[in-house]
Each structure stands twice: as C-alpha cells, then as structure tokens.
Image (cartoon, helix red, strand yellow):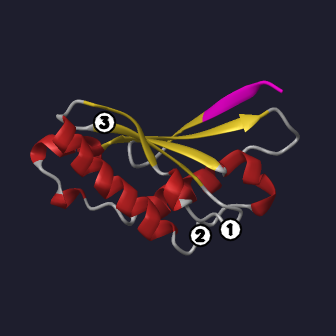
Amino acid sequence: DTATTEIYTLSLHALFRSPTSNSAIGALTPGEREGLTLAIGRCWNVGVLSQEAREAVLVVGFSLDRNAKPVRSSLELVSATNASQSAIRQAYRVARTAVLRCGREGFNLPPDKYERWKNVELLLDLEKMQ
C-alpha cells in the first residue's frame, strides 16, 4: 500500500495535509476541507504574537480521534522557518492553543472518511493570516 499525500490550499493561507493510503475511501470535498480550516481559523489569535513570531512559517502536525477531536499528545511542531527559536515557540503555542480550543467538541468531518483526516499537518504562514 503506497502512501500518498493530499495537499489543499486553504483560505487561511495554509495547507492541510492528510497522509492517506490508496483505498476506496473518497477524498474530502472542498466544503469538508474548508470547514476544518474555518473551524481552526476561528481560534487563531495572532494579535498576541510579537512581530518576529508573526513572520514565522510553521508546519504543525496532529492526529484526530474518531470523534474528530485533536489528540493532545500528538501535537507537534514539524518544522519552522523565518524566525528565532523563541519566536517560533511563541507562534507554536498560539497554533497549539487554537487547534485544541477549536477542536475540543470535535471538527465536523465525515466519519466514513476517517482514514483521510486522522492525521493532519497545517502549513501556517502567520504573516498572511493577520
């Protein structure tokens, strides 16, 4: 089974990456992808970030359980550029908080497509999200 990656450009100037396996499961629709993005976007608070942290470009990875809730222990900073370590840590804290806060009730994702959305990576260009 060869793994593939679906990459979707989102309205928050981010990418949603869902590692998937070749299967009969249908791809997420544009509405489903946008729904996840909008849900997470409601909780972004870039206003608390320093100017340098706003220039960071982060990839934040996390898993979702079958109820589409983020698995707290799975959140990780996959990569980061364009800022110092302290600014990156600050930006990651804001991203982590947004994912956990907006996902505490579970995201509105189709249960039959769990294999498509169980692992998520968000590419966040914080400067473009202001």
Looking at the image, is 9 positioned above or below residue 48? above
- Residue 57, disc: 3
Look at mark 1 in the image and give the residue it sits on: 67
Describe the element under mark 1 as helix, strand or loop.
Answer: loop
Does the stretch in magenta take in 2? Answer: yes
Look at mark 2 in the image and give the residue it sits on: 106
- Quadrant of residue 101 within the rendered picture: bottom left
Q: Are marks 1 and 2 in contact (CB under 8 Å)?
A: yes
- Kind of residue at badge 2: Gly
- Kind of residue at badge 3: Val
- Kind of residue at badge 1: Asn
Visible in this render: residue 29? no
Q: CA distance from mark 2 to mark 3?
A: 26 Å
Q: Which residues are magenta?
A: 1-6
Describe the element under mark 3 as helix, strand or loop.
Answer: strand
Q: Residue furthest bottom?
A: 105
Describe the element under mark 2 as helix, strand or loop.
Answer: loop
- Residue 7, disc: none
Q: Residue furthest front?
A: 73
Q: Residue furthest left?
A: 51
The numbered mark, 1 or 3, whose residue comes first in the sequence reads: 3
The numbered mark, 2 or 3, whose residue comes first in the sequence reads: 3
- Quadrant of residue 2 within the rendered picture: top right
Q: CA distance from mark 1 to mark 2?
A: 6 Å
Q: CA distance from mark 1 to mark 3?
A: 29 Å
Left or right: where does residue 22 sit relative to residue 46?
right
Task: Identify the residue at image location x=19%, y=34%.
Answer: 83
- Quadrant of residue 76 within the rendered picture: top left
The numbered mark, 1 or 2, whose residue comes first in the sequence reads: 1
Visible in this render: residue 21? yes
What secondary structure is the stretch in magenta mostly built from? Answer: strand
Looking at the image, is 108 positioned above or below residue 24? below
